[in-house]
Image: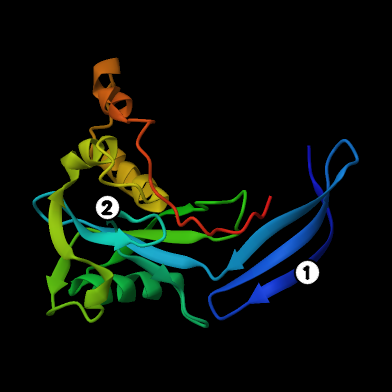
Amino acid sequence: MRWQVHSERSVYRDPWLDVRIADVELPDGRHLDHRLVRTAPGAGAVVTDEKDRVLLIWRHRFITDSWGWEIPLGQVDEGEMPMAAAAREVEEETGWRPGALRPLLAVQPGNGFSDGLNHIYRADSATRIGAPSHPWEAERVEWVPLAHVRRLIGNGDVVCGTSISALLYAYAESLPDDIVLKTSDLSFLYEYDPKKIYPLPGNLPDLF
C-alpha cells in the first residue's frame, strides 16, 4: 500500500540537512503530518589488506554517547562523485589512501525518517600517507581482522547501521561459495543484550 504525499514544507534548513513536514495520506484515508529529514548522500569504504584485515576507526558519537568501530564514511560534497568522496573520507579519517575502489552496496540507514543514502565501496589495499588530516574523527585507527566483525557486532562494539551492513556484506563475500552456515555459526546474533541502554539527551523535542 502506497502512502500519498500531498505537500511538503521545510521547517529548518542548513548546509547539512533539511527538516520537513509532509502531509501524508494513509491507505485508509487518514492524514498524517509526517516529519522527515532530507540530507546530502554519504560515501565510505570497506578497505582490507593482504592479511584480510579491515581498516576501522574507533570513535565516540556524542548524540548517543556511545563508542564503536566504524568504517570511514562522510558526506558527499556538492558536485563530487560518491567514489571520489569515499576515497577522500578514508584518507582524511585514517591517513591511508585506498587502492582501486569498486561498488559494494548502497544503504538507506533510516528510510522511515530520512532520505539519507550511503554509497559504500570496497578496496583490497591501501597506502599509508601519514597522520589523518581529520584527527578529531577518531580516537584510534586500526586494522582489525575481518573474521572478528561478527563478534564485534554481537558484542555491541559496532553499532553504526551502515558500518554493520557494509562489514557483514564484506565478510559474506570473503566466505567460500560452497559454505553452509549452521545455526551455531549465527550464535553471535544471540549475544545481543536488548536491555543495554544507549543514553540520549534529555531535552529532545516531542516530535510525534
Identify residue type, mark 1: Arg
- In terms of sequence position, does the residue under pointer 2 or pointer 1 come before the other? 1
Secondary structure of the residue carrying tag 2 is strand
Measured as percent of width and height from the top left, residue 42 is found at 46, 66
Q: Is residue 36 above or below residue 167?
A: below
Measured as percent of width and height from the top left, residue 28 is found at 88, 35
In the image, 92 versus 36, the foreground residue is: 36
In the image, 152 versus 63, the foreground residue is: 63
Instruction: Tell which residue pokes out farthest to the right in this image.
Output: 29
Q: Is residue 168 above or below residue 58?
A: above
* Residue 205 seen from this side: yes
Q: Residue at x 44, y 72 (%)?
A: 75
Q: Quadrant of residue 40?
A: bottom right
Secondary structure of the residue carrying tag 1 is strand
Q: Quadrant of residue 133?
A: bottom left
Q: Is residue 203 left or right of residue 94?
A: right
Numbered label attached to residue 68: 2
Measured as percent of width and height from the top left, residue 161 is found at 41, 48
Q: Is residue 179 above or below residue 128?
A: above
**Residue labelled with disc 1:** 9
